[in-house]
Amino acid sequence: MCRLGLSTMAEFTGGDDYQAEFDPKVYLERFKFGEDTFGENYLNFSLKHYCKTFTSGVVKGDTLIDIGSGPTIHQLLSACESFKEIIASDYTYRNHQELEKWLKNEPGAFDWTPVVKYVCELEGNRYRGWKKQIA
Ligand SMILES: C[S@@+](CC[C@H](N)C(=O)[O-])C[C@H]1O[C@@H](n2cnc3c(N)ncnc32)[C@H](O)[C@@H]1O
């Protein structure tokens, strides 16, 4: 059994701290392939595990609700084929704005193309223009 003491609990970052301090643009820097070693290591690791989890066929259903999506979609890519609907959510308005910008293809939106292509390669190239399916 895992017991969390008060000192451990106090280290969690609260929603208001994210609202005040979390900068989506800075966070997104780590999702640029080929530009940052730490970010690339994290991305490679997490994408491989998301792929393994969702292509296993064990984790699937009608609706997936992602709590604390931040300004990112990488965590949802491999889940697209396993759920009919995916709901991304976050506490901060700046993260909402960043995702909206990407959804609407607005200038300055983060370019997820290299990440999407990498995930498609991991999954055996099942790239089928999935963005068109986003409502
Ligand atoms: C470190 S980011 C993770 C972003 C993304 N899920 C990823 O894997 O890269 C954590 C996110 O959780 C959000 N968050 C923190 N507390 C939350 C809460 N109580 N409800 C919803 N989102 C929350 C923050 O705004 C922040 O965007």
Image (cartoon, rainbow, N blue to C red):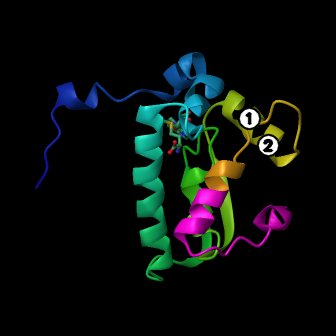
Q: Is residue 129 left or right of residue 86?
A: right
Q: Which residue is mark 2?
A: 102
Q: Secondary structure at mark 2?
A: helix
Q: Nearer the viewer, residue 35 or 69?
A: 35
Q: Quadrant of residue 71?
A: top right
Q: Position of residue 135 (x, y in %)?
A: 85, 61
Mark 1 residue crowding within 10 angstroms, few (<14) / some (14–19) / many (20+)? many
Percent of width and height locating residue 82: 59, 77
Q: Amino acid at mark 2?
A: Trp
Pointer 2 residue Cβ closer than 8 Å to ligand 1: no
Residues packed near mark 2 inside 10 Å, few (<14), some (14 to 19) or many (20 plus): some
Q: What residue span does the magenta drawing correspond to?
A: 117-135
How many discs mark residues in the rendered view?
2
Image quarter of the N terminus? bottom left
Left or right side of 128 for 114: left
Residue 18, magenta (yes or no)? no
| Residue depicted at 63% across the width and 70% down the height | 63
For residue 125, above or below residue 74:
below
The residue depicted at 62 percent of the width and 43 percent of the height is 72
Q: In the picture shown, does residue 29 fall above or below 55?
A: above
Look at mark 1 in the image and give the residue it sits on: 98
Give the residue at x 58% y 67%.
Answer: 121
Q: Evaluate if marks 2 and 1 touch, with contact meaning CB atoms under 8 Å apart.
A: yes
Rendered location of residue 80, percent (x, y): 64, 69
| Left-right relation of 99 to 107 | left
* Alpha carbon separation for disc pair 2 and 1: 6 Å
- Residue at the bottom extreme, as displayed: 57
Element class at badge 1? helix
Amino acid under label 1?
A: Glu
Q: Residue 10, percent across and down? A: 28, 25
Q: Is residue 132 above or below residue 56?
A: above
Up-down: is 84 above or below 25? below
